[in-house]
Image: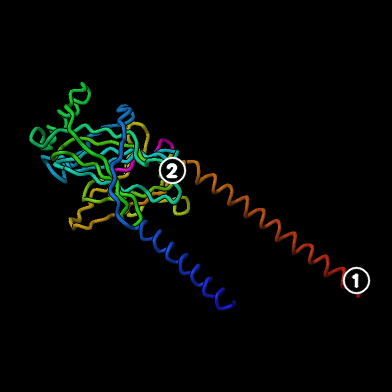
Amino acid sequence: MTLRRMNYNHKIILLFILIVILVVTVGCIDRMEDVDVESTNIDEYEFEIYFNESLDSTHIKNTTSVYLSSNDTVKSVHMIRNTKRLEVVPMEQFIRSGETITNVVTLVEPVTKNEGTVEGIEILKEKIKKNDISDVEYNISKEVIRGREHIFIDFEEKVTGFVAYTLVNQGRQNYVHTVNTPSVVRIILPESYTTGNRVLGYPRPTYDSKYEDDKGRKVLTWYKIENNSDDFREIITIGFYEKSAPLILTYVSIMILMLSFAIITNYYKNKRKRNDLQDEIK
């Protein structure tokens, strides 16, 4: 009877282990599936032309502009040239429901019409204002690679122009950006926010330039990302906070120090009284 019970228990344990292995294995399998995302509002995005003459004097360079917010949404605008696929790797979230990417807007032209010259991209932006952009077919899909979600925006042919989208559940004051191909990366902080404090948050790696735009927002730029290997990955992390946060932190630290000093002083004062009382009793 005991032997049968032991064999039964072993079978249950073995079955449980097999189920765990199956779940883990299925979770690690790469699965490509189409994603249906509607373009809802083009006015949510800023289509800025970033051009650095020290990088290229005639053509634009692939540039990603990331607009952080005080909530958990992030708006990204890619200025692309001669591109057929755009890969997006959102921040890894352990708990998430619904789609990660929303409101995808594509304002692009085939490279046969626009080779990505500075003049060509400026003409394209004028067409955007006049809503004079012809539709280029594209497909959005996602795939789980090594347990992490990858989103792909594929065009029917190589294009030049702007691609914008919104990512949700990306963290309130800490953001991680994965660079898949060599490009310029610009991260625009919300108004009244800053970065650089070792306690509250700072960017890694160190940015190449920093300035304040006409809206009073801090703009950090990385333009020396130039690795051309097939498995290229560059991770940019940034912690950002309200400009008043360091001052508040200083006040709180001073209050804690004063309170700690008062507690320690009171402790030694009471200890001295107890010692004096014990001496009198003796």
Residue at the limit of the structure toward the front, as seen here: 1
**Count of numbered badges drawn on the protein:** 2
Amino acid type at image mark 1? Glu
Q: Which residue is mark 2?
A: 97
The front one of 2 and 127 is 2
- The one of 26 and 279 positioned closer to us in this rendering: 26
Callout 1: helix, strand or loop? helix
36 drawn magenta: no
Task: Please tell me which residue is depicted at 27% across the width and 43% down the height of the picture.
Answer: 141
Q: Looking at the image, is 210 positioned above or below residue 102?
A: below
For image coordinates 54% across by 48% down, the residue present is 249
Question: Is residue 36 found left or right of 97 in the rendered image?
Answer: left
Front position in the image: 223 or 277: 223
Residue 216 visible at all: yes
Q: Residue 141 got which mark?
A: none
Mark 2 to mark 1 CA distance (whole Å)? 71 Å
Give the magenta-colored segment's residue range.
186-192
Residue type of the residue flagged with mark 2? Ser
- Indicate whether 279 appears above or below 176: below
Instruction: Give the quadrant of the N terminus.
Output: bottom right
Q: Residues within 10 Å of mark 1 (few under 14, many from 20)?
A: few
- Residue that label 1 marks: 280
Give whichever of discs 2 and 1 has the lower sequence position.
2
Q: Residue at x 21, y 31 (%)?
A: 107
Q: Nearer the viewer, mark 2 or mark 1?
A: 2
Q: Within the image, what quadrant is residue 21 found in? A: bottom left
